[in-house]
């Protein structure tokens, strides 16, 4: 074994396949604003803008800085989803042909000043109560309510189609749509929305996590593999305790493998016993507390497991959702918080 390291292997062919799954769920005239905020959910902003340029119709980010970086790589539409706040920033949007979201009445004076030079997405608060203008503020936006601009909203419960808030939000959005006399383009759906409310697809959808395989839908695959190597194997008797706090005791003679990664790589310290990992194409389970730099797993049933073998914490074959569901975590958070020391490999850019 050469010096071990924890690794993130990011396969852009899988991201493009996931986009294909998203598209096959939508009308063919609906455009995809692929969301690559937060360093493309941990998949690298620059690499994403390279690898996905033919697969999507535009890029959604949060910050102006991200938008400018993508503009160096792509001529596609770019949307700064949390808006901008100064004349300098609006000038930068203009020079670089970047779209932005107007979500608050406080942005109106500057937005109006630039209304003939820039495209805007006007964000409505239909019930999530985070960002967006409310229905009775729409009148003040009259000059921005034109067909080159987009009317958007964001659903708070798109991942739970039974929640009554969805209906309420969609009704409010319809109401606003009628108020602007059907003049604008429309955008409502994030990833979960694409699968749960495909009839609300309209002109643009805004999938993020689904591109990376972080929600459950047939055909989607986790596009990043987090893995590290086994650096030690312990043979234990029945009734021996493992790791800090000795929180778990063997219930049989056991083989325990020690994997070269831990919470300092970004893997959650709170992960519980029984969380799935994969070794040599066999499922195995975490046993004992996650340390800063080490994780212990039960490989008793895995034939020929040896030092140097790779342990996958998640991968295309072991959905990241197995980990997040068991531990009450979010795939979004796991993907975006992997630490710098984890070595990155990019495939199929
Ligand atoms: C992050 C974000 C999205 C993408 O959400 P996913 O759940 O990752 O698909 C879409 N729209 C807005 C406004 C967002 O902030």
Image (cartoon, helix red, strand yellow):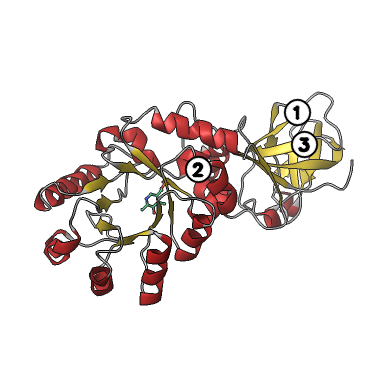
Proximity of marks 2 and 3: CB atoms separated by less than 8 Å: no
Inter-mark Cα distance, 2 to 1: 34 Å
Image quarter (top left, top right, bottom left or bottom right) of the N terminus: top right
Residue 257 left/right relative to 76: right
Crowd class of label 2 (few under 14; some 14 to 19; many from 20; radius 10 Å): some
Tell me how far mark 2 sits from mark 3, CA to CA: 32 Å
Nearer the observer, 82 or 220: 82
Q: Viewed as shown, does residue 323 lie left or right of 230?
A: left
Tell me the residue that label 1 is attached to: 280
What numbered label is drawn on residue 310? 3
Residue at image x 76%, y 54%?
293
**Label 1 to label 3: alpha-carbon separation:** 7 Å
Query: How far across and how far down the image is residue 213, in percent?
Result: 51, 37
Residue drawn 23% across the image and 47% down it: 185
Image height of 174 relative to 100, above or below? above
The residue wearing badge 2 is 53
Which residue sits furthest top? Answer: 303
- Tag 2, which secondary structure? loop
Q: Nearer the viewer, residue 242 or 80?
A: 80
Q: Earlier in the sequence, mark 2 or mark 3?
A: 2
CB of mark 2 near ligand 1 (< 8 Å): no
């Amino acid at each position: 074994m050469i010096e071990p390291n924890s690794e993130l292997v990011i396969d852009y062919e899988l991201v493009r396949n996931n986009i294909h799954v998203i598209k096959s769920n939508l009308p063919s005239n609906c455009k995809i604003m692929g969301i690559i905020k937060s360093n493309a959910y941990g998949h690298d902003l620059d690499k994403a803008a390279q690898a996905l340029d033919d697969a999507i119709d535009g890029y959604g980010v949060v910050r102006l800085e991200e938008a400018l970086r993508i503009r160096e790589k792509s001529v596609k539409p770019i949307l700064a989803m949390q808006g901008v706040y100064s004349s300098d920033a609006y000038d930068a949007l203009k020079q670089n042909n970047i779209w932005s979201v107007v979500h608050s009445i406080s942005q109106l004076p500057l937005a109006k000043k630039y209304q003939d030079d820039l495209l805007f997405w006007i964000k409505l608060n239909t019930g999530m109560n985070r960002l967006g203008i409310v229905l009775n503020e729409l009148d003040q936006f009259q000059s921005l309510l034109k067909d080159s601009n987009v009317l958007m909203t964001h659903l708070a419960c798109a991942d739970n189609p039974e929640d009554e808030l969805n209906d309420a939000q969609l009704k409010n959005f319809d109401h606003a749509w009628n108020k602007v006399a059907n003049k604008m383009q429309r955008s409502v759906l994030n990833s979960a929305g694409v699968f749960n409310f495909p009839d609300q697809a309209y002109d643009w959808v805004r999938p993020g996590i689904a591109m990376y395989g972080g929600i459950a839908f047939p055909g989607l695959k986790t596009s990043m593999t987090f893995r590290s190597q086994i650096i030690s194997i312990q043979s234990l008797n029945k009734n021996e305790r493992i790791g800090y706090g000795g929180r778990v005791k063997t219930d049989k003679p056991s083989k325990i493998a020690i994997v070269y990664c831990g919470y300092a790589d970004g893997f959650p310290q709170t992960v519980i016993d029984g969380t799935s990992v994969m070794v040599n194409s066999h499922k195995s389970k975490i046993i004992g507390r996650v340390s800063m730099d080490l994780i212990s797993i039960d490989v008793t049933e895995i034939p020929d497991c040896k030092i140097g073998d790779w342990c996958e914490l998640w991968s295309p074959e072991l959905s990241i959702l197995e980990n997040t569901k068991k531990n009450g975590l979010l795939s979004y958070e796991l993907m975006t918080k992997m630490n710098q020391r984890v070595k990155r490999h990019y495939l199929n850019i």
